[in-house]
Image: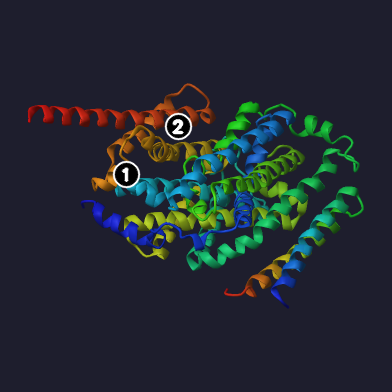
């Protein structure tokens, strides 16, 4: 996958974390479910970001 | 054994050789890079502690918000009008510029002082991470006024983390530095998300209709925790201003701004100030209020975000401690001449031991003040020599022209202004500004007196001949 696409997906993962916390704030997502999903999406963010760094030209 | 100053100076020069020449125009960077560097650097583990301490010090919400707005503005202006113009004018790091002004001996002392202060800061960051790791073992966090470690488990966790961070710093700073690039936006997100999900626990309604009422009664309600000093608007203004004193007024960010196309790039520091030193501090204040105002960064993030929160505190501590250990290692390497791995190991061991003492973590606000204060006079000397000397017709770079190892006037100003600042009968936070002005005036007077002495001597010689 090209680095740019990975970058876009990793940014989307960050945005998803924020959306999850917004849902928890509104009471639409329980605290336990929020914590689990926040952790999983965060892991996804780190994987995508690390891959995008690896694919950067000249690195 | 006699101290071989010229040998140390030569080693120090070799270490910094790569940035000895002024930055060439083709190496100038775009403004967006400065924005991202500042935004990344100023969202760190310290933010978990500082914002929480503002709640414990009984600030009112209005004092906090207006104080942070003004204090951070003053910090941005200090970068823009003090640090960036000198950096753009010289295109040098503070190391090389100070060397011309003060001589290699003073530069070495400056490096050593910096290294020691860095080690303490890294130690505090390890302590912050220990609060997160300790959650798994039911570790009791030391009290607000504790100086010595309260339990063997605390010592064990701090030492283990310290060794781990040191090992990682030895294995490769650059790769880990790149990991920090990845981690910093996520850590910032954890501050925002953590505060957001904590608000309902404090009674904030989903439509935010009672947000201000909760903020003023349950978070920044103006009541200091027992044993904590009551803060007001001016404490916040000065704290936000001097939080990075060594970087802006102390000029160490010349290393960064020498790559700027123009001095106005100093305004990009606002990206770090208003994200890290405004939003993140407010967010950590919200989180600490929800755990009964207990100074426990690990717990407050864990309660808000679960395991991800604990990981955020741990990572924030590590990403702050890692470059700090690296810089301390570099500074010490110049004196010992040891290989970098060995000196980083020594710096790491010292830091790990320091991290066991809760004093540095629990008194972080005071430590930050002292850190800036100690290095501030050097910024005053460089500012005076760069801008005021030419206007008064005073010769610049005397250490370089006279081949001095120590410019004793700089040393006198450094020590004198520190003594002046420490005996001032005002709160620690307000001492640096009079100390800075004192340093500028003293350095001018010392050089002006030298100028008049020299001109009188020349006149006498002319009359005699």
Alpha-carbon neighbours of circle 2 within 10 Å: few (<14), some, or many (≥20)? many
Q: Which of the 4 image quarters holds residue B422? A: top left
Q: Which of the 4 image quarters holds residue B54? A: top right
Q: Residue furthest bottom?
A: A1
Residue A27: percent from left, percent from top = 91, 49
Query: Which labelled disc corresponds to residue B397?
Result: 1
Q: Earlier in the sequence, mark 2 or mark 1?
A: 1
Local secondary structure at mark 1: loop
Q: Residue furthest left?
A: B465
Q: Identify the residue at image location x=66%, y=53%.
A: B313
Q: Nearer the viewer, mark 2 or mark 1?
A: 1
Chain to which the residue tagged by mark 1 belongs: B
Question: Can residue B217 be seen at all in this image of the molecule?
Answer: yes
Query: Which labelled disc corresponds to residue B459?
Result: none
Chain to which the residue tagged by mark 2 belongs: B
Q: Identify the residue at image location x=35%, y=57%.
A: B334
Residue B26: percent from left, percent from top = 50, 63
Residue topped by disc 2: B436
B401 is higher (above) or lower (below) than B423: below
Disc 2/disc 1 C-alpha distance (Å): 20 Å
Q: Is residue B245 left or right of residue B45?
A: left
Q: Is residue B281 left or right of residue A21?
A: left
């Amino acid at each position: 996958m090209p680095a740019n696409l990975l970058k876009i997906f990793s940014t989307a993962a960050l945005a998803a974390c924020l959306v999850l916390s917004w849902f928890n704030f509104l009471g639409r997502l329980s605290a336990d479910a929020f914590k689990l999903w926040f952790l999983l999406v965060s892991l996804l963010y780190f994987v995508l970001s690390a891959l995008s760094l690896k694919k950067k030209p000249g690195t | 054994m006699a101290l071989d100053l010229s040998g140390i100076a030569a080693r120090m020069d070799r270490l910094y050789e790569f940035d000895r020449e002024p930055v060439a125009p083709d190496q100038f960077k775009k403004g967006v890079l400065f924005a991202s560097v500042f935004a990344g650097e100023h969202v760190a583990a310290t933010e978990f502690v500082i914002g929480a301490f503002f709640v414990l010090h009984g600030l009112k919400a209005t004092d906090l918000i207006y104080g942070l707005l003004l204090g951070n503005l003053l910090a941005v202006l200090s970068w823009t009008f003090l640090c960036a113009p000198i950096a753009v004018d010289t295109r040098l790091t503070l190391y090389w510029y100070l060397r011309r002004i003060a001589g290699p001996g003073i530069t070495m002392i400056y490096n050593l002082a910096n290294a020691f202060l860095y080690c303490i800061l890294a130690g505090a960051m390890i302590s912050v991470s220990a609060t997160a790791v300790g959650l798994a073992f039911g570790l009791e966090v030391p009290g607000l006024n504790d100086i010595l470690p309260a339990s063997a488990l605390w010592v064990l966790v701090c030492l283990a983390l310290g060794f781990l961070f040191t090992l990682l710093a030895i294995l490769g700073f650059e790769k880990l530095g790149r990991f920090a690039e990845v981690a910093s936006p996520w850590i910032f997100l954890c501050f925002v998300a953590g505060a957001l999900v904590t608000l309902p626990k404090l009674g904030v309604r989903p439509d935010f209709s009672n947000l201000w009422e909760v903020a003023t009664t349950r978070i920044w309600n103006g009541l200091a925790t027992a044993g904590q000093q009551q803060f007001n608007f001016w404490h916040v203004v000065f704290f936000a201003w001097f939080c990075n004193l060594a970087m802006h007024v102390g000029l160490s960010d010349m290393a960064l701004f020498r790559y700027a196309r123009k001095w106005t790039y100093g305004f990009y520091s606002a990206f770090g100030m208003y994200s890290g030193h405004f939003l993140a501090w407010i967010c950590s204040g919200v989180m600490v209020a929800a755990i009964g105002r207990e100074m426990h960064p690990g717990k407050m993030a864990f309660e808000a975000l679960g395991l991800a929160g604990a990981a955020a505190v741990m990572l924030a501590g590590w990403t702050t401690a890692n470059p700090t250990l690296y810089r301390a290692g570099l500074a010490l390497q110049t004196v010992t001449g040891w290989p970098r791995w060995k000196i980083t190991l020594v710096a790491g061991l010292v830091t790990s031991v320091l991290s066991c003492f809760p004093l540095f973590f629990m008194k972080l606000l005071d430590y930050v003040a002292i850190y800036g204060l100690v290095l501030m006079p050097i910024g005053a000397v460089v500012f005076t020599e760069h801008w005021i000397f030419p206007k008064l017709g005073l010769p610049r770079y005397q250490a370089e022209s006279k081949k001095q190892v120590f410019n004793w006037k700089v040393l006198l100003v450094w020590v004198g202004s520190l003594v002046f600042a420490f005996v001032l009968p005002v709160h620690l936070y307000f001492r640096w500004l009079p100390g800075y002005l004192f340093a500028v005036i003293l350095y001018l007077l010392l050089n002006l007196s030298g100028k008049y002495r020299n001109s009188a001597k020349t006149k006498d010689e002319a009359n005699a001949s």
